[in-house]
Amino acid sequence: MIQAALIVQMRLDSTRLPQKALLPLGTSILASYVMHRLRSIPAVSYILACDEASYETFAPYASDQGFTIVAGPKNDVLLRYCIAAKTTDAQWIIRATGDNPLVSYELASCLLENIDEHVDYAAYTGMPKGMGVELVKKSALERVCSLTTDPYYREHVCPFIYEHPESFTVKKLQAPQKYAIQGASVTVDTLEDYTLVKSIIDACPPDPDDDTILAMLRRKYC
């Protein structure tokens, strides 16, 4: 299995749903719920990478969930990841985002088990939006940081890698068929998204597994 550090990005000033990281979810807030769920993914360390303005607010929540917190630029998320990656000896990074409280730790674990050391970037496709993570070599992130100044690539971190397969080894795996639910999403970008995800979490037992989440999504989307 790949030995990786997990880095999750978060910030407070979301344009479409301001302060969404602090919205109530489960028994705490969205940010804490995300970190708690990510702790089920096997990793050598867990790091919250936020912007400078969010650091003070997030610090106690990160500590409570066993995450180290690192601050970096707000819009240059790629550089923020590179700064956070320098705090760990791990050569692989699991990239997660703070708007995905129902991320699949099952798929993430399978990804770590099924990727070899020669790959620069790997991810599953074909599951509901918001259930996946990305696995990327630290050296690949550092190369991208030196290769492009394009704001799009600096904000979204990994697209430069999988859009340049001539320069990076990319592996995208198809998620098992049970994850194929057309149009399904558990990403929290808007108030409507939050309402949906909160309704799923409120209706589920604590720490729902993928089968429980997928069953709830089929009721809505199928």
Image: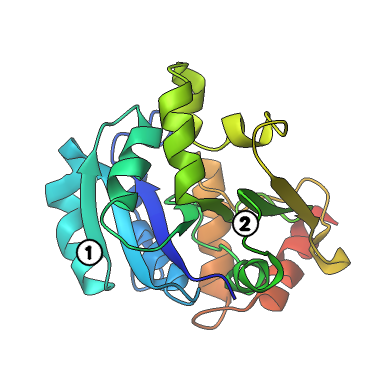
Does residue 87 appear left or right of residue 204 in this picture? left
Would you place residue 85 above or below residue 106 in this image? Answer: above
Q: Quadrant of residue 65?
A: bottom left
Image position of 82 with respect to 62: above or below: above
Dot 2 lies on which element? loop
The quadrant in which residue 79 appears is top left
Please state if 164 lies on the left or on the right of 179 as rendered: left
Question: x, y (%) of residue 13?
Answer: 30, 34
Viewer-proximal residue among 206 and 58? 58
Q: Position of residue 59 (x, y in %)?
A: 16, 58
Q: Which mark is residue 132?
A: 2
Q: 213 or 219: which is nearer to us? A: 213
Asked whether residue 22 appears in the rendered view, the answer is no
Q: Which residue is mark 1?
A: 61
In the rendered view, would you say 133 is above or below 40?
above
Colour approach in the figure:
rainbow
User: Which residue sits at x=47%, y=16%?
Assistant: 150
Give the left or right position of residue 63, taking residue 201 as reference: left
Q: Residue furthest bottom?
A: 205
Mark 2 neighbour density, 10 Å: few (under 14) some (14–19) many (20 or more) = many
On the rendered image, what quadrant is the N terminus found in?
A: bottom right
Q: Residue at x 67, y 36 (%)?
A: 162
Amino acid beneath label 2: Gly
